[in-house]
Image: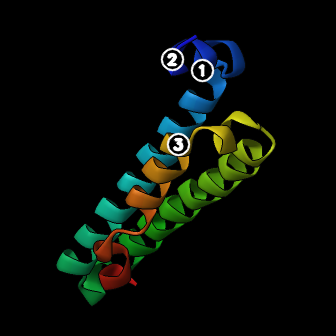
Amino acid sequence: MTSDEIKKIVDGERTEQLTNQVCHHWEVVTARLEELDKDYSPQLEACVVAEIYACILRIRSVITTLMELNKLPSAFLFSEYLDRISATINESNLTNSA
């Protein structure tokens, strides 16, 4: 039995979907924060607050999704999921935007 066959048996598509969701939301948050940093001006403070609130909601979604992934054994059996998440979340632009 190949590793792909084992993966199909053990791993539902849910882990893949959740991993994609985490990475997508995190990339959107990072891009929005970078744009806010570039375009910030005191005259647009109300708009900035709305954008930051949207980012917070996406981060909350990421946390909820990570907690759901934590319950799925396949997320730990196959390192590719954790590797993709850590590659997305450990980007240097996160540090720059904070």
Answer with mark 1 or mark 3, whichever residue precedes in sequence. Answer: 1
User: Label 3 crowding class (10 Å Cα cut-off): few <14, some 14-19, many 20+?
Assistant: some
Front residue of this view, candidates 55 and 51: 55
Front residue of this view, candidates 89 and 46: 89
Farthest-out residue, left: 38
Q: Position of residue 95 (x, y in %)?
A: 37, 82
Left/right of residue 95 with respect to residue 62 in the rendered view: left
Farthest-out residue, right: 71
Label of residue 81 in the image: 3
User: Label 1 crowding class (10 Å Cα cut-off): few <14, some 14-19, many 20+?
Assistant: few
Q: Amino acid at mark 3?
A: Tyr
Q: Secondary structure at mark 1?
A: helix
Q: Position of residue 56 (x, y in %)?
A: 56, 65
Image quadrant in which the C terminus is located: bottom left
Q: Where 36 falls versus 54 (above or below)? A: below
Left/right of residue 11 with respect to residue 67 in the rendered view: left
Judge depth for marks 1 and 3 and give the one in front.
Answer: 1
Q: Amino acid at mark 2?
A: Asp
Q: Quadrant of residue 48?
A: bottom left
Residue to which mark 1 is pinned: 7
Q: Position of residue 37 (x, y in %)?
A: 26, 79
Q: Secondary structure at mark 3?
A: helix
Residue at figure coordinates x 62%, y 17% from the top left: 6
Residue at figure coordinates x 48%, y 36% from the top left: 20
* Tag 1 and tag 2, C-beta contact below 8 Å: yes
Label of residue 60 in the image: none
Q: Position of residue 68 (x, y in %)?
A: 75, 43
